[in-house]
Image (cartoon, grey):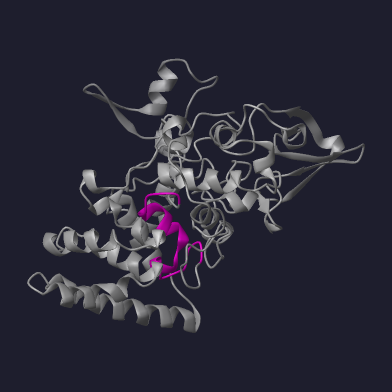
Amino acid sequence: MAAKYAVGIQTLQMNRDHDYGGVVANQLQTFAQLGLFTGPLPAEPAALPRLADYRDDSQDINFRARAYLHANCAHCHRRWGGGNAEFQLLATLDLGDMGIVGVRPGQGTLNIPNAKIVAANDPYRSALFYRISTVGPGRMPRIGSNLVDGAGVKLLHDWIAQLPAAGLLGDASSRAALKNAGSIQQLRSAGDASTEALHKQLDPLLASTSTALQLAQALADESFPAKVRDWAAARVAQVENTDVRDLYERFLPEERRIKRLGNVIKPEQILALPGDIERGRKLFFETSGVQCKTCHRIGGKGTEVGPDLDGIGKKYARAQILENILDPSKQIDPKYVTYLVETKRGQIFTGLLVSKDVGKVVLKDAANKRIEVPADGVEVIAPQQKSLMPELLLRDFTAEQVADLTTYLSSLK
């Protein structure tokens, strides 16, 4: 949290055996022998907490799935962790205290009907399951993750599927999933079918994000005929809905995948593209996984966290707009400087400074939520050199998409 610890260096994750070049030893005991602790450890590591091994099928699936989320997601998705979403994925919390089961997503539904962060007994209405199953702007984790982890996806699918659902909605979604499963089973034996017949079987499953997610999970099964898998992936590549299309990119050969910008971006290549104003407008306001409108407003539409972008084209040329997106911390307007507040109890908050007086300090975080801290409980308040706007925001975009976006923004005069 706010760089006060290294990700993964904690008792829960380090309390396990490690192979040190032929010598297997508990990591915590090894650290103790190196003199890294100020006091002695218990004689047995079993006395200390540890995460379940998510790869060990003999362990409870609830513990395994929670361990996976803790290790891969909880460094941001925890209190004061910096994530924009208001839920926690710590394995140390009870499931009901995580704020995910039956909760509507706060960062978009990804065009999933009746979406929840986790829809008990229904992975295909679960935004969390979608985000780890896809590539592109809707993917999580956003940084340090470029490939879909098939083992992790299957684990979380099976975990969500076994969570008990309640009420008629759970029954209805189960019936829908069974119906779709029947259609997918027919596809398994459709290797010799005509193109027209394959279209007829496949296209209804691509009509929504939820059904497309169910089909993608089935295609990941190694028992699925490779011919049908390849044909389905090629067909989906023609779909305009990016929420659906991005789910299937992992099944395409490398040379046929979308060429995303990644971590090394060359502005001159983007600026050489003409860009399209209308496509850029749709990208800003309508494309799932694109967070522009969650922090900025244009024409009164969007959320007021960062500055309004009305008239941005008068202030900056297209090249300057691109530079500000690529390096948001290079020049920060004083009104949008991020502040860090550390309390005397060790709590850490970050956000824009709304007000500060003898009674309280008020911040506004990246989710546009007000944070009020009593002034007498503040230990440190300090401006930061980093913008609230994240870096590497464009890594999952294509050059053409960024060209469209910057062309649209530069047209706002």
Indicate the position of residue 368 as horizontal and vertical percent values: 70, 50
Using the rendered view, name the quadrant where residue 285 is placed: bottom right
Q: Quadrant of the N terminus?
A: top right
Q: Is residue 213 above or below residue 87?
A: below
Segment tinted magenta in the rendering: 116-137
Q: Is residue 387 magenta?
A: no
Using the rendered view, name the quadrant where residue 396 is placed: top left
Q: Is residue 232 left or right of residue 289?
A: left
Indicate the position of residue 374 as horizontal and vertical percent values: 84, 41
Residue at the outermost right position? 358
Indicate the position of residue 327 as horizontal and vertical percent values: 56, 30
The answer to which of 93 and 189 lies nearer the viewer is: 189
Q: Is residue 120 magenta?
A: yes
The answer to which of 200 and 79 lies nearer the viewer is: 200
The answer to which of 380 and 399 lies nearer the viewer is: 399
Q: Is residue 60 visible?
A: no
The answer to which of 23 and 407 lies nearer the viewer is: 407
Q: Is residue 111 left or right of residue 208?
A: right
What is the number of callouts on the image? 0
- Residue drawn at 66 percent across, 26 percent down: 385
- Residue drawn at 34 percent across, 59 percent down: 245
Indicate the position of residue 323 as horizontal and vertical percent values: 56, 32
